[in-house]
Image (spheres, helix red, strand yellow):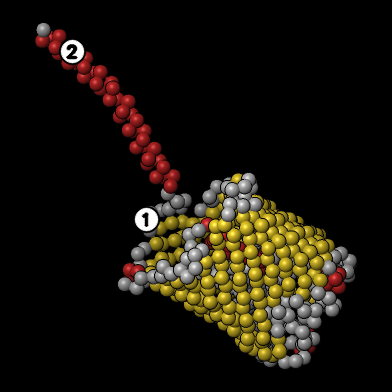
Amino acid sequence: MGKIKNNIYKSSSTRSSSRLLPLFVIAAIFHAGSELRAEEAKPWGQINDYLRVTGEFQGSYEAWNFFQPSSVNSNNEYDLWSLRARLGLQLTTSFVDAYAQAQYNGLYGLPDNAVAAPPVGALGLGGAYYSANQSTDPSNVFLKQAFLNFKGNALGLPGTQLKVGRFEYMDGLEYKSGDVKFDGLKSKRVAQRLVGSNVVHVGRSFDGFSTVYDQPDFNITASGLRPTQGGFTVQGQDEISKIDLFYTALTSKRNALLPGTEGRLFYLYYNDDRNTQVVDNRPVINRPNLDKQDLNLHTVGTHLLTLQSLGSGSIDGLLWGAYQFGDWTNLDQQAWAVDAEVGYQWTKLPLKPWLRAIYYLSSGDDNSTDGKHKTFFTALPSPRTYAKFPYYNMMNLQDAFVQMIVSPTDKIKVAIDFHHLGLANSSDLFYSGPGATSRSGSFGYSGRPSGGNTDIGQLVDINFTHNLTKEFSWTLYYGHAFGGNVIQNVYPRQKHADTAHVDFNLVF
């Protein structure tokens, strides 16, 4: 009888154990899966709670069929490659963050004959790269960023930060709202109009300081900066010590004063006394060197950006404006620029179509002998943000265009722009360029005669972006320019142009 009881007990224990075993297995699998997910959620390059390695790799292929001047020896049709790699080390603590980043740039297959005699200059970016580097395959490694960011919260000063060293800087992005669409509009249509780091393939950094006082309803930022070389030249290590910037902005955050709306007041001081000659609409012989008569410019401005739900979608609007005064060498600076934009997105329709209309106008100079300079000066912008096909820039310009954006999936976006471009004043020059990119020799902007015309022509460009993952994306761009009378005056042999490029970008 006892044996039977023991056998029953053993049998019962075995059955209970066998029932519990699947539960233990499921629990173990769930625990292992949790650990795996936690491991997967850990950012790439995270060494520990304080240290992280960051990196970026960008490859690009460009094909150009540029306008053609009267010179038959100038090459307006070519292609080129570029590579950019960045490697950084980031330290994060409660009191201070530190960051150091190195950058490699390589440009390959640059044309050595894509530059025409002045005032025409480079025939597309390939000619500009070669002129700046005097090599068909230039490359270099340099210090892109190295800064300390002191946090006031840990010191009893909530909302304050002080960044010192070398870092990237973009006006108009003093804070982010956290709304992806709203911040996307800020990045593409507000930021980097006057100060930006995203200059073609090499980029631009700034040496100096930036202090921030950030509160729930507003942000105050003040910065003193000197740009580095970059843009066209791969020699990005050197600081351009003859250019001084001071920038400050007061931003009323989204929803602080009006629902869905933010506003900013800003001021920019720009001083340039490099050993180079200024570019304006005076005869070349009358243009002073900046080390004799410098630029001493003040720009005050504002923007209002709003995004509101309306009907079955959302409506957005932007007003941006700036006034400029000071000394343009031995002339008085009196210039201005305005931008007005409105858009509507049907968020519940297939493709989520988003239609936007934009009108930009910046002043030009109507008289080169009256002691005044009236051309709006864009300082140190990120030019391809506002001119994807950069044969023009935002000086002495009238740009009226419509934009259609569609999203076939959450990861794919296609933007199609139709521009009508003209000069604001036919007595002024037709300008291009990204601002200063070298310590001496090049002003950073070029100007070509208009021939008394204002019609630059039309531009159609298509931009396709595919974010395959959070870390990897690629972009395909095509632009075609239909040249008007201004283009015909500068490029009489071919007044139409095409460019296309494909970019691959990996960030971790």
Q: Secondary structure at mark 2?
A: helix
In the image, what residue occupies the spot 59% across and 84% down?
298
User: Type of residue at label 1?
Assistant: Asp
Identify residue for label 1: 49
In the displayed structure image, the side of residue 70 where residue 199 appears, left or right: left
User: How far apart are labels 1 and 2 at the CA level?
Assistant: 55 Å
What is the x, y in percent for residue 119?
80, 76
What is the x, y in percent for residue 391?
75, 67
Quadrant where the N terminus sits is top left
Which residue occupies the foreground of this view, 24 or 256?
Answer: 256
In the displayed structure image, the side of residue 24 where residue 467 appears, left or right: right
Tally the marks: 2
Which residue occupies the foreground of this view, 412 or 285?
Answer: 412
Q: Nearer the viewer, mark 1 or mark 2?
A: 2
- Which quadrant of the structure image shows residue 216? bottom left
Quick one: which residue is furthest to the left in this view? 2
In the image, what residue occupies the spot 32% across and 25% down?
22
- Which quadrant of the structure image shows residue 388? bottom right
- Which quadrant of the structure image shows residue 133? bottom right
Residue 248 appears in the figure: yes
In the depicted structure, whether residue 297 falls above or below residue 234: below
Quick one: which residue is furthest to the front in this view? 311
In the image, what residue occupies the spot 41% across and 45% down?
39
In the depicted structure, whether residue 288 falls above or below residue 234: below
User: Type of residue at label 2?
Assistant: Ile
The answer to whether the residues at label 1 and label 2 have Cβ atoms under 8 Å apart is no
Identify residue for label 2: 8
Dot 1: few (<14), some (14–19), or many (≥20) neighbours within 10 Å?
A: few
Q: Closer to the N terminus: mark 1 or mark 2?
A: 2
In the depicted structure, whether residue 322 falls above or below residue 296: above
